[in-house]
Amino acid sequence: MELEETEEEIQDFQKEKMAKLNQLDVSVVLKIKQIQNLVMNTEKLKHWEQMAQQELAAKEAEILNSKPDDPEAQELVEDARNLFQNREDDRGFFLSKDLNDSVLITRQ
């Protein structure tokens, strides 16, 4: 009987120890692109969208001017537009002042 009680006490101790280990605060280093808790600055976002549109227009003009009679030029312009539309651009978004009541989700 005493052996069973001792084993049970050991298991209880291990459970308590694991519970305490699970409560430890751990610091994790994240890259800015991994943090999803960003706040939008509408003014800055509009500014960066305009800049991106200008970059796209310049790229399209460069393609069309470098190959004016090339039928592939239009295809290259379409590729540039697709890249533009599918880009990840976090400019205009900022970290909130604090992360209270926030849930952080990481991505690869």
Image (tube, rainbow, N blue to C red):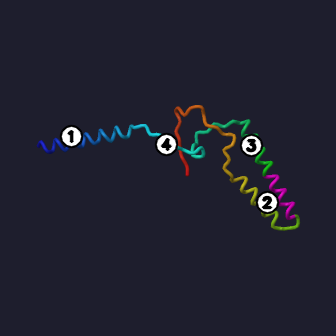
Marks 4, 2: nearer the viewer: 4
Verify CB contact (< 8 Å) between mark 3 and mark 2.
no
Q: Which amino acid does label 3 sit on?
A: Trp
Find the distance from the CA under tag 4 to the CA under tag 1: 34 Å
Q: What element carries label 4?
A: loop
Q: Looking at the image, tell me whether mark 2 or mark 1 is earlier in sequence order.
A: 1
Q: How crowded is mark 3: few (under 14 residues within 10 Å), some or many (20 or more)?
A: some
Can you tell which mark lies on residue 28?
Answer: 4
Q: Looking at the image, tell me whether mark 4 or mark 2 is earlier in sequence order.
A: 4
Magenta extent = 56-67
Quadrant of the image occupied by residue 95? top right
| Residue 37 rendering spot, x and y as whole percentages | 58, 39
Can you tell which mark lies on residue 77?
Answer: 2
Above or below, 68 relative to 99: below
Q: Name the residue under label 3.
A: 48
Marks 4, 1: nearer the viewer: 4
Q: Is mark 3 on a helix, strand or loop?
A: helix
Q: Residues within 10 Å of mark 1 (few under 14, many from 20)?
A: few
Above or below, 95 relative to 79: above
- Provide the major secondary structure of the magenta segment: helix
Q: What residue type is labelled 4?
A: Val
Q: Looking at the image, tell me whether mark 3 or mark 1 is earlier in sequence order.
A: 1
